[in-house]
Image (cartoon, rainbow, N blue to C red):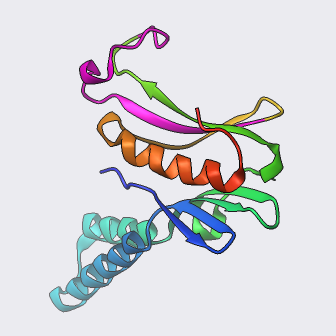
Amino acid sequence: MQIHLSLRRKGDLFVYGIPVWYRISSAVAALALAAASIFSGGLGIPGSIIVIIVILAAFYQERWTFNTREDICSGRMGLVFAAKGPTFKASEISRFRVDNFAKGRLDQKNLPPEDKMPGGSQARLIVDLKNGESFMLDSVLFKRRAELEAAARVLADALAVPLE
């Protein structure tokens, strides 16, 4: 299962991450499983493991925050209480780019035309910093490239950097 990240804007703050509905649905599923275990007399070891995984899924975070007013960008991945990731200044960003990855090909420099991309190929949103560092913000199936480019365009415009 792939969770598609979404872009939300709150004034000068842009958040690109897991949508709120994912956390809500994970919490509801955890509550339903916990209630079922109470009324059925228990889940056993495999059922308990599944409930724990669903509970942890409600606390999983994958989020990139771009604050244009304070010139701060940060990425956080992992469980909310232990999430880690890079932090850098927005002014350090040199560009955003959307790269294609063709599944099953060693040579990624000579990719097939877009209409002939193999199934399972991906489009990746990457932010390049002026110091040469790069971070992959998101990776989606190639057929969802247009949605990824739309989010990249909004971020690039907000931060006044090119999108390539």
Magenta residues, start to end = 106-129
Nearer the observer, 51 or 3: 3
Q: Where in the figure is residue 22, as x and y percent of width and height?
A: 38, 69
Q: Where in the figure is residue 142, as x and y percent of width and height?
A: 34, 34
Identify the residue shown where x is 78% and y is 29%: 132
Identify the residue shown where x is 69% and y is 70%: 12
Identify the residue shown where x is 60% and y is 53%: 155
- Residue 162 position (above or below residue 40): above
* Left or right of residue 10: residue 49: left
- Residue 125 position (above or below residue 39): above
Nearer the observer, 151 or 44: 151
Q: In which quarter of the image is residue 122?
A: top left
Q: Where in the figure is residue 82, as x and y percent of width and height?
A: 65, 64
* Left or right of residue 33: residue 94: right
Q: Quadrant of residue 81?
A: bottom right
Identify the residue at the far left of this view.
40
Asked if residue 110 is among those painted magenta in the image, a careful observer would answer: yes
Q: Does residue 85 appear anywhere in the picture?
A: no
Instruction: Locate the C terminus by quadrant.
Output: top right
Identify the residue shown where x is 49% and y is 11%: 109
Q: Where in the figure is residue 145, as x and y percent of width and height?
A: 38, 39
Nearer the observer, 90 or 76: 90
Q: Does residue 86 appear anywhere in the picture?
A: yes
